[in-house]
Image (cartoon, rainbow, N blue to C red):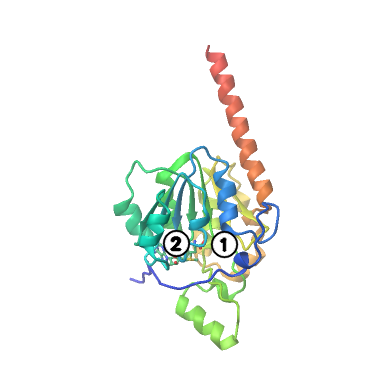
Amino acid sequence: MWSQTYFFYDLKHSSAESHPNPQTSGYNMFRHDIVNALLDLTNDRRYLEIGVNRGETFHNIRASHKVAVDPKFLFDVSEAISANPEAEYHETTSDDYFENVAASTDTFDVVFLDGLHTFEQTLRDFNNAQFLLSNDGIILVDDVLPSGFQSAIRDIPKWQKVRAALNIQDKSWMGDVYKLVFYIASYVPAFSFATIANNHGQTVLWRQQRAHDPLNDTLMEPLVRMNYDDLILHKSTMRRMPLNSIIDEIATYRKGKQVSTTEIDLNGT
Ligand SMILES: C[S@@+](CC[C@H](N)C(=O)[O-])C[C@H]1O[C@@H](n2cnc3c(N)ncnc32)[C@H](O)[C@@H]1O
């Protein structure tokens, strides 16, 4: 059976790192600014990153406890351990981490999924991450908007050959992670989501039941067979909005939840 649980690649991030802007309203923010802004919505600031590479994001996260998972860290792990006593480093695949390393009692407030960029692997990472997510936890999925048709090719050797054949300079490989957003829109109503419009494309997910809208459903078979052109034609499913608006939406929902819980408590006394 075809399987691809790990493919090593040394990747410099494309757009986001080259246009730093620490404002949540700016364009092309650093990934770590986005994660830090999401952690600000949580009480305990416990952070898990799947797919860490050079640690460009991980080592700039302000967390009370943080866990890095990657089959091949591209930095000196011993040095990183002594410099970051609040961090754990697991040089392994996400599947192995969730199955054999994480304790069932481990809990995270923000989980950043940025490992192997295929639909199946990211779906498995998303499913596994839910078991370790705090009630008010947030999952951030990277690279849901491929920068071009070649970036959406899920097979890495094929993506490299196409780039070479067409002399495409863009080095970003985003695979078919975008299908996860369509899957969640159709089949995971327990999570609300929105996709950051002012960067390269990351989807933010939080626990909030959504009304099921059959008009937005994608059947499973066409979903799995989606291509880049289908994504472009159905981009509205991604709910793209500026990070500020996403943060407001989460904060408003939580405030409403607090108010109704207080009302229930008051009624009970
Ligand atoms: C885009 S890079 C991550 C970048 C990093 N999150 C950052 O913001 O700087 C993707 C990483 O996923 C790792 N990776 C590939 N397959 C994986 C797997 N099965 N489990 C976890 N990580 C994986 C690769 O080794 C690579 O370092």
Image quadrant, ligand 1: bottom left
Residue at left offset 48%, top offset 39%: 44
Q: Is residue 9 above or below residue 213?
A: below
Given the image, on which type of amino acid does mark 1 rest? Val
Residue at left offset 54%, top offset 60%: 142
Q: Position of residue 232 (x, y in %)?
A: 65, 66
Q: Position of residue 118 (x, y in %)?
A: 47, 66
Determine the CA span between mark 1 and mark 2.
15 Å
Rendered image quadrant of residue 199: bottom right
Residue 192 appearing in the image: no
Residue, far left: 100
The answer to whether the residues at label 1 and label 2 have Cβ atoms under 8 Å apart is no
* Residue identifier under label 1: 144
**Which label belongs to residue 51?**
2
Residue at left offset 34%, top offset 41%: 105
Q: Is mark 2 within 8 Å of ligand 1?
A: yes
Q: 266 and 56: which one is in front?
A: 56
Q: Residues within 10 Å of mark 1 (few under 14, many from 20)?
A: many
Residue, far bottom: 165
* Quadrant including the N terminus: bottom left
Given the image, on which type of amino acid does mark 2 rest? Gly
Give left or right: position of 221 versus 244: left
Instruction: For mark 1, give the secondary structure.
Output: loop
Q: 115 and 43: which one is in front?
A: 43
Q: Is mark 1 within 8 Å of ligand 1?
A: no
Instruction: For mark 2, give the secondary structure.
Output: loop
**Which label belongs to residue 14?**
none
Q: Position of residue 236 (x, y in %)?
A: 67, 57
